[in-house]
Amino acid sequence: MGEIFRSITSIGVLILALCVFPGFVLSENGVTTRHYKFNIQMKNVARLCHTKSMVTVNGKFPGPPVMAREGDRLLIEVVNHVPHNISIHWHGIRQLRSGWADGPAYITQCPIQTGQSYVYNFTVVGQRGTLWWHAHISWLRSTLYGPLIILPKQGTPYPFAKPYKEVPIIFGEWFNSDPEAIISQALQTGGGPNVSDAYTINGLPGPLYNCSAKDTFKLKVKPGRTYLLRLINAALNDELFFSIANHTLKIVEADAIYVKPFETETLVITPGQTTNVLLKTKSHFPNASFFMTARPYVTGQGTFDNSTVAGILKYEIPSNIPHMKKLQLFKPSLPALNDTNFVTNFTNKLRSLATPQFPANVPKNVNKRFFFTIGLGTSPCDKKNQTCQGPNGTKFSASVNNVSFIQPNTALLQAHYFGQSNGLYSPDFPINPLHWFNYTGNPPNNTMVSNGTKLMVLPFNTSVELIMQDTSILGAESHPLHLHGFNFFVVGQGFGNFDPNKDPNNFNLVDPIERNTVGVPSGGWVAIRFLADNPGVWFMHCHLEVHTSWGLKMAWLVLDGKLPNQKLLPPPADLPKC
Ligand code: C2O
């Protein structure tokens, strides 16, 4: 393990380099336990010539990588030293029976209050690849995030040639002002929140922004080698295109699932998604450097940050080449900001490996079918005679099946486990929209959402098919939906309204991509399947944080099975209280 840690940290990812090693490692009965300590603390960080005090883990921005191997147990002690409530989510970790460690505030736990701590305790079962961790309360994940890298079991190779080095590349969004103030103001006025001031790669905006040339991520490479780039989109509100000038990327994994490899110049990655790519460097020193850039894919109608983050791919200069020469710099060309065709073509290429060693266990028989509309809507102003800054004087809202989720003031999982759900949530999330309308046609006159804390209840081992249908209310828009506690298979997608008679004939049940976050196409639908084999309360929401804030979220309650190993584990003693 040490060797891989060192190769990851020696690539100039200095920001990530400092805190890689777990506090200590213990092995017992063949299970390795890795201990981490996350001190949540304020730290002054400067970008774009603005210094601000931000919430960090151990003073690092981005946060430290958490590393483990498949099968390891992780014990991560989070100590809250800041004047904010905190919770941390291990995005993509299945949390089999350990939902108490999942992290979304008021869903699986009460937040950790100032001065308190909580030990996240979970085992990584049957997963390996790139995931990430982030704060899961309000907009604090804008600065609280980092890689979560799961290596295969000792001695198990990747299903591709061993890369020379591995490099995490984590995209983020930088706000000159405090994101907590931005969202709280937006929720009060009802208008859209201010957009970010920059995108970042490993926390660095790069030379295309004011005052940022020194804050540029540089990837130094040798010729003729293969690098594994572990891409993570931790941006708050933006899907991103990414490309490296004059280089081809081979996609080998998505959301910690191996895929059938394919080559591309450019890729698209939604918030919440991760993508591993192999970068083969040129066989000889190319006498040039190369920009790697990312900028948004935008389908919505609101304002957005249309800037571009750049990092630099630099080849080691051979000793026989004089040093003073100014190298040529190549720049990639990215698709147009609204290039949905590119996105469709790209996502259609993603296929599970579907080999005996890495099978695609797509549920073939479906027990329950659901149809959820996904989209924006409006709510009235809180006070009568007040004018809000959303559409026609209303407040922006967002919903699933027209239910805009109301965050409860105590955690749903506890309420469920201790039989105290009365008045906190209702188990009646609608299986389809209450009113049919032409979802992707002219929107209905009434765009008001309803509100509630409704859960969809599933018996253990229910095999689920879920169609998620974008609506055109306040504009069609791509929504990256993330499901906690499960991976799902993306068996189909299309544009317009889903046709239950025709579209299922084209479902791919052989090698569909398996993942935890999928883009519901703008003006279209996506069909997913999963097996509800993990008891607990599982959040599902748009990973565009502004939409989550507006209520585009719901939760599934998966009941215990009959066997002892099909039941939710008891809550840990230090579980935070509300
Ligand atoms: Cu990455 Cu519920 O989040």
Image (cartoon, rainbow, N blue to C red):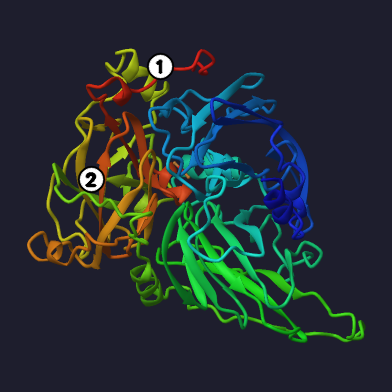
Residue 500 image point, x, y percent: 10, 59
- Left or right: residue 33 compared with residue 380: right
Q: Quadrant of residue 114?
A: top right
In the image, 223 versus 54, the foreground residue is 223
Q: Residue at x 30, y 30 (%)?
A: 453
In the image, 567 versus 231, the foreground residue is 567
What residue sits right under mark 1 in the picture?
A: 570
- Asked which secondary structure carries label 2, the reply is loop
Residue 42 image point, x, y percent: 73, 35
- Asked which secondary structure carries label 1, the reply is loop
* 132 over 525 or under it: above or below: above
Q: Residue at x 71, y 50 (%)?
A: 3
Mark nearer the N terminus (2 vs 1)? 2
Disc marking residue 420: none
- For the residues labelled 2 and 1, the Cα–Cα distance comes to 32 Å
Q: Quadrant of residue 74?
A: top right
Residue 493 appears in the picture as rendered: yes
Q: Assess disc 1: are there few (<14), some (14-19) or many (≥20) residues with their C-alpha within 10 Å of its C-alpha.
A: few
Question: How many callouts does the rendering have?
Answer: 2
Amino acid at dot 2: Asn
Residue 423 image point, x, y percent: 28, 18
Residue 540 image point, x, y percent: 35, 42
* 35 over 336 or under it: above or below: above
What residue sits right under mark 2 in the picture?
A: 401
* 90 over 121 or under it: above or below: below
Q: Residue at x 27, y 46 (%)?
A: 530
